[in-house]
Amino acid sequence: MIETNRLILRPMTEADKPWAAAQCADPEVMALLGGPQTREASDERIDKMIRLQAERGFSFFGLFRKADGRPIGLCGLKLFDAEGATLPGEVEIGWRLDKDCWGQGYAREAASASLDFAFGTVGAPLVIAITSQRNAASWGLMRRLGMTRRPDLDFNDPRFGPEDNPTILHLIEAKDWEVGAWKTA
């Protein structure tokens, strides 16, 4: 479990499946993430997160607001495994929040804590993040986190349509991330 000023990040559990499925079914939340998903697909992803957390010691965390305990999304790490990916096997960071939580700094707070975890606990030499050119909010956050756009590492991801390809990649190396610096910002 990781605590920030406003959030608790903790491994996903079976009990998280209903709220995660509702988020995955939201067309606005999922518009730039491959589109809405069925309950079955969402549950399979949660099962995978639970398994990877047990096997590797990291996966995507559930994000819970401290003020009211409400689950508001996911943020965390996985091994980069998209088909056709450049840098397969490197640590990838990602996030997804309920639409009423967008623009409030939660994604940056959770992503910063996840990068601390990646570099401080997991020992990753670098972390990558992917998105589409249309997802300006995500690539904007990647830049605010100190990540650098790497057009030479972009790739066509078959999970997404032509409007979201090529998939763009941002990267940050451990030497460029100051663990804990975000806590005083």
Image (cartoon, rainbow, N blue to C red):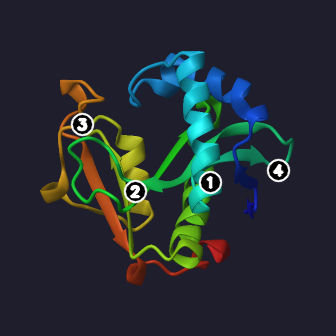
Residue situated in front as seen by the camera: 62 or 12: 12
Q: CA distance from mark 2 to mark 3?
A: 19 Å
Q: What is the crowding at mark 2: few (fewer than 14 residues within 10 Å), some, or many (at least 20)?
A: many
The amino acid type of the residue labelled 1 equals: Gln
Q: Which residue matches tag 2? A: 142
Q: CA distance from mark 4 to mark 1?
A: 22 Å
Query: In the picture shown, does residue 166 fall above or below 78?
Result: above
Q: Which residue matches tag 1? A: 53
The tag earlier along the polypeptide, 4 or 2, is 4
Q: CA distance from mark 4 to mark 3?
A: 36 Å
Q: Position of residue 1 (x, y in %)?
A: 75, 60
User: Do tag 4 and tag 2 residues touch (Cβ < 8 Å)?
Assistant: no
Q: Which residue matches tag 4? A: 66
Q: Secondary structure at mark 3?
A: loop
Query: In the picture shown, does residue 120 fall above or below 159?
Result: below
The amino acid type of the residue labelled 4 equals: Lys
The amino acid type of the residue labelled 3 equals: Asp
Residue at the image point whose x is 70% and y is 50% from the top? 11
Residue situated in front as seen by the camera: 122 or 54: 54
The tag earlier along the polypeptide, 4 or 3, is 4
Residue situated in front as seen by the camera: 36 or 51: 51
Residue at the image point whose x is 55% and y is 34% from the top? 45
Q: Secondary structure at mark 4?
A: loop
User: Do tag 3 and tag 1 residues touch (Cβ < 8 Å)?
Assistant: no
Of discs 2 and 3, which sits in the foreground?
A: 3
